[in-house]
Amino acid sequence: MSFLLEADDLVRIYSGRSGLFGKAQPVRAVDGVSLRLAQGETLGIVGESGSGKSTLGRMLLGVDPAQGGSVCFDGQPMPATGSADWRGLRARMQMVHQDPLAALDRRLTIATQIREPLDIHKIGTEDTRAARVQDLMEAVGLRPDQADRYPHELSGGQRQRVVIARALASDPDMLVCDEPVSALDVSIQAQVVNLLRTLQQQTGLGMVFISHDLKVVRNLCDRVAVMYLGRIVEEGPSEELFANPRHPYTQALVSSVPEPGKRLDGRVILQGEPPNPAKRPSGCAFHPRCHMASDICRGVIPELHATGEGRTAACHLVTDATATQVA
Ligand code: SF4
Ligand code: MG
């Protein structure tokens, strides 16, 4: 099978800030991540803040260059960040961020901003560009009379529709969405998620959907990767992974999602502080918070390995044979 995107063993290290008494420790924000995205597929990336999701998202587009490992897009190695080849490729890979106001220029009308990628990548003629902007506005549910408005004249949900329209203007093959609805009112979130789903189905683009909201991810994504302190700790088809999480961290995440009528006994409580990337624990980085941790967990990093049914997990207790027994 050929993939739209193939990332292998990606590493990104930030030079950490030094504390009052300590030396600066390098922070491995992304630490050996490999993943695949097929055409037309939606891959969710979940995890708490500080898990490296956003950094990984930018690396998949080459916005943040990888310091180790490789990214292949449509069978070709990712060109160097900022090179002419990379800028040309950006028409085919677009990003939607959390904060639409920050992503938009408040001095430009929304029609001008949706049109921008067409001008940059020299797509179409004067006439076809104007028509394309109208089509895109309609596709994302904006009214024609809003074309000459400025970002501050729109609601948050409408602004995110503008950002999505602009991301789709160049007819990309891949869209990376980083928490695209978490800054929006809850009442608007479902509308924007449904819009993304519809557009994804219509265009057949591959989508990476980064979110800490498990409900949205379960609802939208074909496959899910769970990140903890820069590594993928579990990956698999969305429905199976959420119905039967195998890694203790995924189990804790899933059981913390409130659901009407869900019984509270048997819940795996996520204990301890959220992870600090500057202070990675030894062995399995999750061990200080894991209710299943034993000596081996403190000393040996568990590798991500196949656990059956197209799934992987990085936990000493989860093997193919015992996969369904860990609870
Ligand atoms: Fe918990 Fe050990 Fe598995 Fe890590 S390797 S998730 S500490 S049981
Ligand atoms: Mg983030």
Image: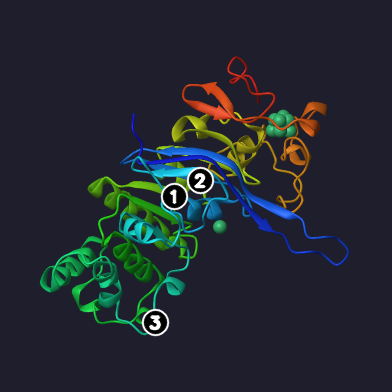
Find disc 1 in the rendering and name its residue: 209
Give the distance between the C-alpha atoms of the residues marked 3 and 2, in whole angstroms.
Answer: 30 Å
Quadrant placement of the N terminus: top left
* Mark 3 residue type: Arg
Q: Is mark 1 within 8 Å of ligand 2?
A: no
On screen, residue 31 versus residue 167, left or right, reads: right
* Mark 2 residue type: Ile
Position in image of residue 184 (x %, y %): 46, 65
Q: Say whether residue 197 is visible.
A: yes
Colouring mode (rainbow / by chain / secondary structure / one colour): rainbow
Find disc 2 in the rendering and name its residue: 45
Residue count near mark 3 (Cα–Cα under 10 Å), binned few <14, some 14–19, many ≥20 = some
Residue count near mark 2 (Cα–Cα under 10 Å), binned few <14, some 14–19, many ≥20 = many
Mark sitting earlier along the chain (3/1): 3
Quadrant placement of the C terminus: top right
Q: Residue at x 59, y 21 (%)?
A: 323
Give the distance between the C-alpha atoms of the residues marked 3 and 1, in whole angstroms.
Answer: 26 Å
* Mark 1 residue type: Phe
Asked if residue 8 is positioned above or below residue 318 in the image, the reply reads: below
Q: How many marks?
A: 3
The residue furthest bottom is 107
Q: Residue at x 66, y 46 (%)?
A: 229
Q: Residue at x 55, y 23 (%)?
A: 306
Find disc 3 in the rendering and name its residue: 106
Q: Is mark 3 within 8 Å of ligand 2?
A: no
